[in-house]
Structures are given as C-alpha cells and as structure tokens.
Image: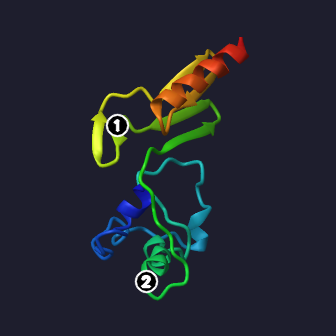
Amino acid sequence: MALADVCGFRDHSFQSSLFAGRHIAGPNELFRDVEVASTQFSMPYNFDPVENLQQFQDKDSKVKIHFDHGTTTLAFKFQHGVVVAVDSRATAGPYIASQTVKKVIEINPYLLGTMAGGAADCSYWERVLAKQCR
C-alpha cells in the first residue's frame, strides 16, 4: 500500500521516512492563500501519519490490520475537469506480469472506468457497462 510504504510502515524506518522533514501548517497558515498553488505539501495541523500508523504495528495492539498490496486508482474532480490516475503494472502475487497495462478505460466520450483486480473480470464488466450506456 502506498501510504504504508511512504510512512516506512513495513521496514521500521520511521525517522528516515518522507515525513521526517515535513512542513506542518499551523492554524493561521492552514487556510491562508488556499487558491495559491504551492510546491510544498502541507500536512494537517497536529497530524502525524507515521505516529498514527504505529499503533497498528505494535505487537500488543488489539487492532490488527493487514495491508493488502494492489492497484490504487484515484480520480479527482476539479473546476476544469477530472484527473484519473492509476499505476501501469499488472501483478500476479509478487510477480510483475506486465508494466504496460491500460487500467484507465474509456467507456464512452463522457465516462471513464479504472481497472483493478482480475483483468478478465474488469474487461468483461467494462463491455457490459459500455453496452448499457449505448
């Protein structure tokens, strides 16, 4: 899982993770110039994802979470359209089956789909959905 990897969740390298030198916005800074593009990501005030994930890794914790690795598909709607993002690798367990899979599928000129999971199942349901849209 990308968040677990970024936070160093698996390899215990919490201090050397990307969040070690992060910029944490204070309450006065958090909402100032919201529309101005910034090259620096701001973390929510008083929030540390590494610390929050640590509670799930402790052996004495009553909460047991197993992060499954797999495809992440994201879509963001904004004023001028939509951005859809996926990874481009197909895996079969630890084996990378293909690095050029097309996981964003155009259903029709107004509808996109993303593929995650079994490629055959996704392709089938994409065809069914395209047929229903016609």
Q: Mark yes or no: residue 110 visible.
A: no
Tell me the number on the disc at residue 89.
1
Residue name at image x 57 percent, y 39 percent: 75
Q: Quadrant of residue 126?
A: top right
Residue 68 in percent (x, y) is at 45, 57
List the residue tagged with mark 2. Answer: 58
Up-down: is 18 above or below 106? below
Q: Amino acid at mark 1?
A: Arg
Up-down: is 81 above or below 21? above
In this picture, residue 117 sits left or right of residue 99: right
Up-down: is 98 above or below 130? below
- The earlier-in-sequence mark between 1 and 2 is 2
Q: Amino acid at mark 2?
A: Asp
Q: Quadrant of residue 82?
A: top right
Residue 113 in percent (x, y) is at 57, 29
Count of residue discs: 2
At numbered mark 2, what does the secondary structure look like: helix, strand or loop? loop
Q: Nearer the viewer, residue 50 or 104?
A: 104
Residue name at image x 65 percent, y 20 percent: 128
Residue 11 in percent (x, y) is at 28, 70
Q: Residue furthest top?
A: 134
Residue name at image x 46 percent, y 66 percent: 66
Tell me the number on the disc at residue 56.
none
Q: Quadrant of the C terminus?
A: top right
Q: Quadrant of residue 97?
A: top left
At numbered mark 1, what does the secondary structure look like: helix, strand or loop? loop
